[in-house]
Amino acid sequence: MAPPPIVQQKSSSPSQPSGYVFFLPSLSVLLLNRKPLRFLIPSYCLSRKSEVSDLKLQLRQLAGSRAPGADDSKRDLFKRVISYMTVGIDVSAAFSEMVMCSATSDIVLKKMCYLYVGNYARCHPDLALLTINFLQKDCRDVDPMIRGLALRSLCSLRVPNLVEYLVSPLSSGLEDGSPYVRMVAVLGVLKLYHISATTCFDSDFPASLKNLMLTDSDAQVVANCLFVLQEIWNLEANKSEEANRERETLLSKQTIYYLLNRIKEFNEWAQCLILELISKYIPSDSNDIFDIMNLLEDRLQHANGAVVLATIKVFLHLTMSMTDVHQQVYERLKAPLLTLVGSGSSEQSYAVLSHLHLLVMRAPMLFSSDYKHFYCQFSDPSYIKKLKLEMLTAIANESNTYEIVTELCEYAGNVDVPIARESIRAVGKIALQQYDVNAIVDRLLQFLEMEKDYVTAETLVLVKDLLRKYPQWSHDCIAVVGNISSKNVQEPKAKAALIWMLGEYSKDMPDAPYILENLIENWDDENAAEVRLHLLTAAMKCFLKRPPETQKALGAALAAGVADSHQDVHDRALLYYRLLQYDVSVAERVVNPPKQAVSVFADLQSSEVKDRIFDEFNTLSVVYQKPSYMFTDKEHRGPFEFSEEIGNLSLDQESMDNAPRFDESDKDLLLSTSEREENGGPSINGAATPGYSAPHDYNSSLVPLSSQTQSEPAVTSRTSFAIDDLLGLSMLAAPAPPSLKLNSKAALDPGTFQRKWGQLGVSISQEIPISPQGVGSLTTPQALIRHMQANSIHCIASGGQSPNFKFFLFAQKDDGSASFFLVECIVNTSSAKAQVKVKADDASASEAFFALFQSALSKFGM
Amino acid sequence: MISQFFVLSQRGDNIVFRDYRGEVPKGSAEIFFRKVKFWKEDEEEEAPPVFVGLSNVDGVNYIHVKVAGLFFVATTRVNVSPSLVLELLQRIARVIKDYLGILNEDSLRKNFVLVYELLDEVIDFGYPQTTSTEILKSYVFNEPIVVDAARLPTLGPASMFMQGAKRMPGTAVTKSVVATEPGGRKREEIFVDIIEKISVTFSSSGYILTSEIDGTIQMKSYLTGNPEIRLALNEDLGIGKGSASLYDYRSSAGGAVILDDCNFHESVRLDSFDVDRTLALIPPDGEFAVMNYRMTQEFTPPFRVNALIEEAGQLKAEVIIKVRADFATSVTANTITVQMPVPTYTSRRVKGAVSVGDIVKFSSLDTTEDLSCTVGVSFELEAGAVGQTTDFKEGAKRLEWCLKKACLSHIFHQSQRILSGAKSVTNSFIQLYILFQCSFKIVGGAEHTLRTKLTFSQESHGNIAREAGPVNLNFTIPMYNASKLQVRYLQIAKKSPSYNPYRWVRYVTQSNSYVARL
């Protein structure tokens, strides 16, 4: 963009700048006082009014003055007016005086006047008419600067009655010789569109812009045309077919290549927005993809983080269909992103780190050697530390766990209590996702010895979760937990965890009944319903194991529970009471069933939501970790939402099949983890298909989610899913869990397996894709074996090395019959595919079994 | 796109307010300020740079950066790129600084009309137009009213307790790009700063756990006529290590500087970079980063820090911190600050048990009777430690106090207030953290030791080292750079034989996170 030639003499400032005195005494007190104005006492209001009328008077006196120094005084007055306007004082009363004074050749005065008029015209449409005249005149000035400024102000009036005056200055503006004026005029069209869309279309402005976009020599004019067309067609797309078509032409190969070829002419901000458009482009073939990537490669070295992120988005979206290239892209973008994290202000780092966070969460294994970059630094603000802790948790694997956990333990004593808590939680999460938890358990138990309230509280919650997954650790943990005085535990979550352990392991803790009794005595002081619920259940469990010692406490608990004002507590107490009345052995089965260790704790976010966020890379969604429909209204989702439906057109077939799955997981969202665990005990299938559950606070965000799906019949959610499915990249389509039940304790000796394998014919042979998370987790065959075992599919033999693994698996129907399913599964991690052969005693059930198998496999690595 | 842009002072009033699209309801500035001031979401006490307004109701997103104690805020209803807006806000601040010379509340208030002129051209209807200081020159007609740099409050050691301590490095030059100097003619000069922020973590045994340098070559040009500049870096400069061995500290052969990665300003041409490591550019007006780089290669940290805390009898502990400067004696580091959080146990059960440790220095002070806490810390510095001062900071609540005689009563007042506040919260033990801090200058090769005695009002639980620390160092070392990256020469294309502008090249090393664990 070339600056317009300056005809006007550059600021022949009529007076010494230092001589300015532009605060009136009384108001300057007001301004310097910097208190919110609503606290002002009425006398100030009076004086404020008189200030304004005083200003009006002075302006009126100066209006016609041609005396030397008049412009000087005008400047002072104008400045005062603008400064009042800035702090929020209504100075619109001086509108006509300001307009009268605006007949001047002093450009500084003019600019201030334009600013004033733009601010107040909307609330004083009648007065705005006064300004039309001089603005129109200025639009025909010889100085392009004046023409541009006037045109911008004219379009910024936002008064519907005045649109008729806009059309002709805009038309001539678009054809102006000065790029500055054209640039302003292009955005003027958008302003006009927002005031009156029909006027905009009637004058055929979109067509002129389209023409201008493809021909103008000035890059900023081209960029502005693009922004305007994007915004207009995006808003119009629902209303007309034509708009839809126009919107698509912006994404045509021709337009995209035209912009790409000129990309370096644009300034960095325009580049960002153009790259955003390119990221929606659907390439025709792989040459297309590589051409674009080669052209944009050097953009990754840009010092501006926004340009780099926009480029990365293009790269990621273009390579979605090419798994190996996609991975290379991850490798390629690591270094530039890390440099950006280090170079800007902490706010800029935060934006970049949020994106890095997203990528780490998608492919933790690719970042596992970079863990030191995510160590917290002393100067990091807590919002950055939090992200880093989450990333460290995600990338912990066999090779780096020791270092990461050591580092995290350092933070546990941190002065910053929220971060200390977060660190402890991170250690716990790592323990839950690792198989070698030995050392970590020790560390956790050491936390308990620190005797800091919050450390103890966090640790207790973790120890509870750990025990649910690794019951074998109960001995070590219980010994330490038993020493904790329940008086030192105040936080409801921690208290509930402690009580749960007291109930569950009451056999191993000699004091359990007495501690519980103590707690039950203080029933009335217990504010949290969560704690009271756990107290009831723990008392029951303890009673069933050690009846004589607990009977009294249980009686007290049930009595207190039935009398409780909280509905859930009341109901649960009543249920237990009746159960005991009915049959103690039934109660035992309900309350104290043999539990299977939890294999995988459900993720907070469904993978569908995560994929939505990934689609919206380089937007606020990533920072909020929420898809846009959760925080923006439809009309403002902006030009970036864009090609969603376009993508949908070609992918419709797939999306139909997958649609039902969402209802499934949405329902699951309504149950909280603890609820499912407590109540779902006896059902083995409950553990075999861990649905997605949400923490309590997630429920609030569910409301927009469900309403969204109703209002636009699942189009959006289906789309994003379908894209990913087609590309075989993300969470695969898991069919609804079938009703077939498998015996979790099935046994088969290798000899029998071999014999059966020989006898039976192949009933199903199919190739199924594996999620990238799954591929990442499959470093050794054991990982998959454990996972399948949790789904009641057992392994009899396995072997192979990356990238090829071979498994022989079997499962047994849980209906008493000795009907077995035998599976041969050959996994190739580089192609992310599994060759599956199923043989079955009962061939009619093999279809159902295969579905179950596939669903179990698809959850691998999640 | 961007709906509004505004600048708020620390007290929350509008200094500049520009509404570009008129789609955000009134009062956004107030909503923003209240949110930032009383941030309490997600257990965090500091508002992130990006957040939603009234819990999803109005769909307004607030994006802000803090510069010079001011909030630069943009609001939007569109799902924009956060990075784009944050970069833009930072750039707007920088452009304003280019014009005003100094960016602070005072200069902004004096020049708000000029700032409006800039804002008009930088953003139109929410779309960024241009942020080039140079192009903007032709649109700005107000003369900047220069604020006297001497009147700027110096950033004392307290400044690092300001939120968002990771400040953007900037050149020290405070000259407007448009203001003409009293003499009439502009002085032809160019400033190049090589600024490195280093992060080092020492383990308790003094072993380096992590180390990293984030560097930037900052340029500010006052040259007329846009001559081309060639900036030559170390000839043996390497870029990009084997990605797998980022932390494999192989000894760098022949002392070559190897950067992990770097990025460049738009104006930089890299035609001959691969051959002789020279950057060619036509510097735009104003301040900008020519190149940012990151290095994890092994380097000699400027300071060795050893910290030790040990119990010295009941309710007592001793802290010994040793700092050794590992650089040439010709270099002097300014204002080194050592901070270490130490636990203080306070309890209402110990009521009346008052003693101010064995602080001999301050024993002349009166009135400690009804103080129910013991905040006893005494300092012994080496003999001849002139000019060293020691301050207390109450970390968690960010109160500031200093242990000068005049202020001591103030400390007691403060700690009483904390205590009375704390009593109402919980009846069990509470903990306060005290950061102690001491600032001094240090010459290359010198070693300083700080001994501190701590007195507790309650027995510590076993391992005191787990509850104190880590020690953090803050410092600035002029004329020193840890990475050994150098500007070999700075060549300016000559317009005439007599043309010889001033060239200033400066090296500065700052601490980013310099931590020694106990």
Image (cartoon, rainbow, N blue to C red):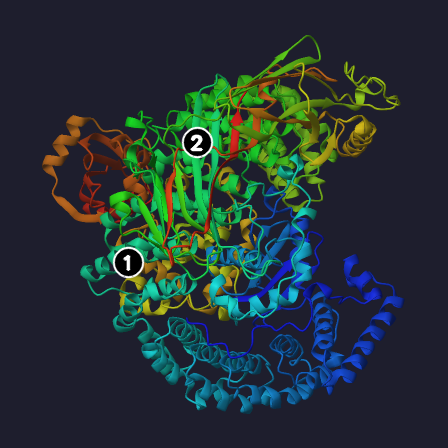
Q: Quadrant of residue B161?
A: top right
Determine the residue located farthest toward the front in the rendered image.
B498
Q: Amino acid at mark 1?
A: Leu
Name the spot of residue B18 as percent of width and height, x first: 61, 68
In this view, the mark in front (1 or 2) = 2
Q: Quadrant of residue B336?
A: top right
| As drawn, A67 above or below A858 | below
For the C terminus of chain B, the quadrant is top right
Q: Residues within 10 Å of mark 1 (few under 14, many from 20)?
A: many
Name the spot of residue A715 as percent of width and height, x first: 39, 66
- Residue A771 vs residue B369: left or right? left
Asked if residue A500 shows in the view, the reply is no
Kindly identify which residue carries mark 2. B482
Chain holding disc 1: A
Between the C-alphas of marks 1 and 2, the distance is 40 Å
Could you say which is closer to the camera, residue B482 or residue A254?
B482
Q: Quadrant of residue A195?
A: bottom right
- Residue A424 vs residue A297: left or right? right
Kindly identify which residue carries mark 1. A318
The residue drawn where x is 69% and y is 67% is: A16
The circle drawn on residue A280 is: none
SS state under label 1? helix
Determine the residue located farthest toward the left in the rendered image.
A758
Could you say which is closer to the camera, residue A112 or residue A839?
A112
Instruction: Count numbered badges in the picture.
Output: 2
| As drawn, A141 above or below A627 | below
Name the spot of residue B282 as percent of width and height, x first: 38, 57
